[in-house]
Amino acid sequence: MALARLQVSPSVRAGEAVEVRLLVQHPMETGFRRESDGRAVPMNVVNSLVCRLGAVEVLRAEFGSGVSANPYLSFWIVPPASGELVVEWVDDAGVKGRVAATIAVT
Amino acid sequence: MSRRHFLRAAGGLAAGAALPAAAQSNRILPVQDIAPLIARITGGRPVEKRDVTVELPSLAENGNSVPLRIRVASPMSATDRVTDLHVFAERNPRPFVAAYHFGPVVARAQVDTRIRLAVEQRVLVIAALTGGRFLSGETHVVVTSAACIDEGI
């Protein structure tokens, strides 16, 4: 259900910093919005997100309702070795998502 | 209700609606006390107000998606690095925006994202460094079209 994009340069020279860009498709409902019939839309945001490279935890994030819909995140890493960069997240409804990209360190 | 009474009441409502927008948003979304949230991060240790750059447009057209870049002047070496970033918007209905925890692979103390801002306000970032040190930075943003409160007012 959850769509996402993880963009990172597929090949990196050893010791070089590379930007990781992540876009998760999620409404990030604040809980303040109402349907046209007046019912409140319950809060549902991606509350936690983890990025791992192999077994190493790269970055962990917690989001509140102050993060925009379709959360975007970019950060810089120096990958120590080739591997699969995996991002996993979970929202308030318990729905989990996962996206991965492969990095080759040359 | 007589027509006269109705008109009088309606006039009062109209006058209320004509209040300056800033005064209205002040009433609806007051500055919230984020000191307890900060204390939970720092454990009461001092926070130095330097080296944290909070890059936001000074005027945000749409409060639903405001680009934010946080940068901390840090060597990001194994012994001297930023470990966590905490973002607060004290006039959002929920002041906590996001927290980022950096593992050892993160090369720069920099994060780009997009946030929601309810009204014109100050955005505060607390950075936790190795050795139990804390830095902070802040930026003031003017929001023309607010997030979160697009109804009911």
Image (spheres, helix red, strand yellow):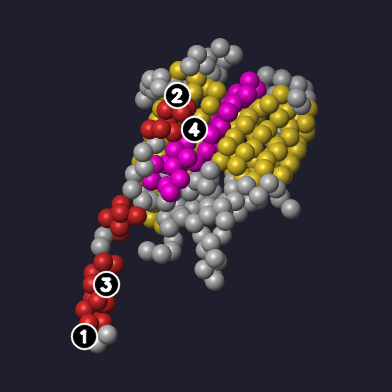
Q: Residue at x 73, y 28 (%)?
A: A53
Look at the picture and state if B18 lies above or below A81: below
Q: Which mark is residue B42?
A: 2
Do labels 3 and 2 touch, CB within 8 Å?
no
- Is residue B107 a member of the stretch shown in magenta? yes
Helix, strand or loop under label 3: helix
Q: Residue at x 64, y 46 (%)?
A: A91
Look at the picture and state if B102 lies above or below B55: above
As drawn, which residue projects farthest toward the top? Answer: B79
- Is residue A68 a member of the stretch shown in magenta? no
What's the residue type where badge 1 is placed? Arg
Disc on the earlier residue, 3 or 2: 3
The reply to whether residue A54 is visible in this rendering is: yes
Corner quadrant of residue A90? top right
Q: Position of residue B37 (x, y in %)?
A: 44, 33
Q: Secondary structure of the magenta portion, mostly? A: strand
Separation (CA) of disc 4 from disc 2 = 11 Å
Helix, strand or loop under label 1: helix
Q: Residue at x 63, y 24 (%)?
A: B103
Q: Which mark is residue B85?
A: none
Q: Which residue is mark 4?
A: B86
**Chain for numbered disc 3:** B
Q: Which mark is residue B14?
A: 3
Q: Which residues are magenta?
A: B87-115
Disc on the earlier residue, 4 or 2: 2
Badge 4: few (under 14), some or many (20 or more) residues near its Cα, within 10 Å? many
Q: Which residue is mark 1?
A: B4
Badge 2: few (under 14), some or many (20 or more) residues near its Cα, within 10 Å? some
What's the residue type where badge 2 is placed? Thr
Separation (CA) of disc 1 from disc 2 = 60 Å
As drawn, which residue projects farthest toward the front? Answer: B1
Disc on the earlier residue, 3 or 1: 1
